[in-house]
Amino acid sequence: MKVDQFFEHVQGRLIVSCQALDDEPLHGSKTMAKLALAAEMGGAAAIRANGYDDIEAIRQVTDLPIIGLVKQDYDDSDIYITPTKKELDELIRAKVDIIALDATGRKRPGNEKLADLITQVKSAGVGVMADVSTLEEGLSAASLGVDCVGTTLSGYTAYSPQHTGPDFNLVHSLVEHVHVPVLAEGRYWSPEEAIHALELGAHSVVVGSAITRPQVITKRFTDQLKKAGVEHDSKVAGRKLIKRHS
Ligand SMILES: CC(=O)N[C@H](C=O)[C@@H](O)[C@H](O)[C@H](O)COP(=O)(O)O
């Protein structure tokens, strides 16, 4: 899908992030493809996915456009979302519609420059999503020619606000000051929060964990039960369960 078509297609809609790293129970391309198919059945407009194998598997089951990234750690940098040209090559090979990369002001591995990475993506005819954590980073990325900015990294850099929920202030200020579409992403847990971001002017909303990370969803329930002080002793609860089924 051409970059303009992509933004037309996702406007006012939900994008579902289907990702599980190798320490997560749902890790594996077959599972990510199933999650993407489920997201499509639920009405998602696009998928955000990590790595060549997951992207290939997802493409086998759905024609939805894909925002691709590669998570990769390097010793000399805190940046892990599509940090270097090597990961860009992988995503260009995977023929994703949009490449998401960390566009924070932090030092990149091997001192590579964000501007050079953006040039590489653009010259391959692929769109760029700049994952940022502050307004300044959004402005700077937009001036380098990215196609959209995402609030993805707010709360994940030391100098950005450490909210427990979505960073609506950042959505609002990016919408006000940046001339490219703003994708609201990061800690969206309810349809009401997604609607609020769209009302603030976000182009689309990206939701991950609340839909595709069952261990995180489960923990939200168990944490709330503990906090409310209503959790029973597990042995007693287990015995009751057995009795009820016998
Ligand atoms: C900070 C970071 O590494 N974010 C990653 C970016 O691709 C993903 O792990 C998140 O799941 C994604 O941003 C969606 O956010 P949430 O899972 O909160 O809905």
Image (tube, rainbow, N blue to C red):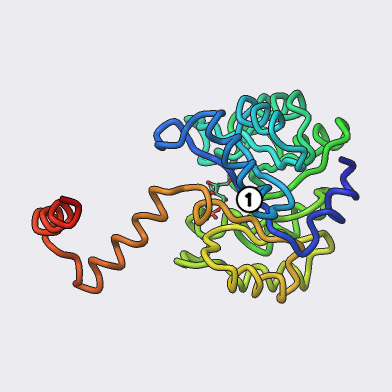
Quadrant location of the N terminus in the rendered image? top right
Image quarter of residue 230: bottom left
- Residue lying at 75% horizontally and 35% vertically, measured from the top left: 117
Q: Please state the total of marks drawn on the protein image.
A: 1
**Residue at the spot of label 1:** 16
Where does the image place residue 180, in percent across and percent down from the top left?
82, 59
Where does the image place residue 109, in percent across and percent down from the top left?
58, 32
Label 1 residue near ligand 1, CB within 8 Å: no
Q: Residues within 10 Å of mark 1 (few under 14, many from 20)?
A: many
- The type of residue carrying mark 1 is Val
Where does the image place residue 123, in percent across and percent down from the top left?
88, 32
**Compared to 112, does 128 lie above or below?**
below
The furthest residue to the front: 246
Where does the image place residue 17, in percent across and percent down from the top left?
60, 47
**Compared to 43, does 23 lie above or below?**
above
User: For this view, does 115 lie left or right of residue 61?
Assistant: right
